């Protein structure tokens, strides 16, 4: 990605940790505490990683999907967006945005294969509908800056500097 992070809206919209870990009122009414909220996000991040490993996408796609999920939950509540559907839908959208497309039907197949629990099951139509809700929640802003490109350059420069 050739854009400059420091001049981007991504940088200008960075949130402090206190702003990221906010439990929405609807979630509080359902009895979700801050610890529950963090635990659910962690569990869903691991779920995204397992699902991504099954469908064989790059690590960058996983990082983008987790970022999308976290961005959605800074704007919307878990009551509105079920994490068990949001997680695979974020992976589906991230695969598209990172040009590593995964078919929704393949995701549904692996969701059924990985989870014996009926609560995690979803249909293709639900993933596609949730994709649109995610896009709206993110205000159609899908750019995510990752260190995957700049970190090797930094390590190389560090190596040259030390040598």
Image (cartoon, grey):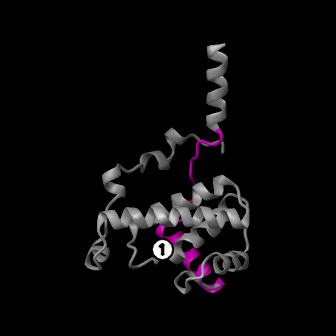
Which residue ends up furthest to the front in the rendered image?
116
Asked if residue 139 can be seen in this view, the reply is no
Vertical placement of residue 161 versus 114, above or below: above
Q: Position of residue 88 (x, y in %)?
A: 59, 72
Sort mark 1 into few (<14), some (14-19) or many (20+) by Cα contacts within 10 Å: many
Q: Position of residue 21 (x, y in %)?
A: 34, 58
Region rendered in magenta: 124-149
Q: Where is residue 57 in the image (x, y as percent from the top left)?
A: 71, 60
Q: Where is residue 79 in the image (x, y as percent from the top left)?
A: 38, 79
Most foreground residue, 110 or 2: 110
Residue 74 is drawn in which quadrant?
Answer: bottom left
Can you identify the residue that label 1 sits on?
Answer: 83
In the picture, which quadrant includes the C terminus? top right
Q: Is residue 13 left or right of residue 127?
A: left
In the picture, which quadrant includes the N terminus? top right
Vertical placement of residue 113 versus 157, above or below: below
Asked if residue 125 can be seen in this view, the reply is yes
Numbered label tally? 1
As helix, strand or loop, the secondary structure at mark 1 comes to helix
Q: Is residue 82 left or right of residue 114?
A: left
Residue drawn at x 52%, y 84% as measured from the top left: 119
Residue drawn at x 51%, y 76% as measured from the top left: 84
Residue drawn at x 50%, y 67% as measured from the top left: 44
Most foreground residue, 84 or 86: 84
Which residue ends up furthest to the top in the rendered image?
163
Instruction: Assess whether residue 62 is covered by the magenta stretch.
Output: no
Residue 114 is drawn in which quadrant?
Answer: bottom right
Instruction: Assess whether residue 145 is covered by the magenta stretch.
Output: yes
Residue drawn at x 68%, y 62% as measured from the top left: 53
């Amino acid at each position: 990605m050739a854009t400059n992070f420091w001049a981007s809206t991504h940088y200008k919209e960075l949130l402090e940790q206190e702003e990221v870990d906010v439990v929405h009122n609807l979630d509080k009414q359902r009895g979700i505490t801050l610890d529950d909220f963090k635990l659910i996000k962690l569990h869903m991040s691991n779920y995204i990683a397992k699902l991504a490993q099954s469908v064989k996408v790059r690590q960058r796609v996983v990082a983008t999907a987790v970022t999308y999920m976290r961005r959605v939950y800074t704007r919307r509540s878990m009551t509105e967006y079920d994490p068990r559907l949001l997680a695979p839908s974020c992976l589906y959208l991230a695969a598209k945005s990172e040009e590593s497309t995964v078919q929704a039907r393949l995701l549904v197949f692996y969701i059924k294969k990985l989870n014996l629990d009926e609560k995690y099951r979803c249909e293709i139509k639900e993933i596609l509908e949730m994709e649109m809700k995610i896009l709206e929640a993110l205000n159609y802003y899908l750019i995510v800056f990752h260190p995957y490109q700049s970190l090797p350059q930094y390590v190389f420069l560090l190596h040259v500097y030390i040598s």
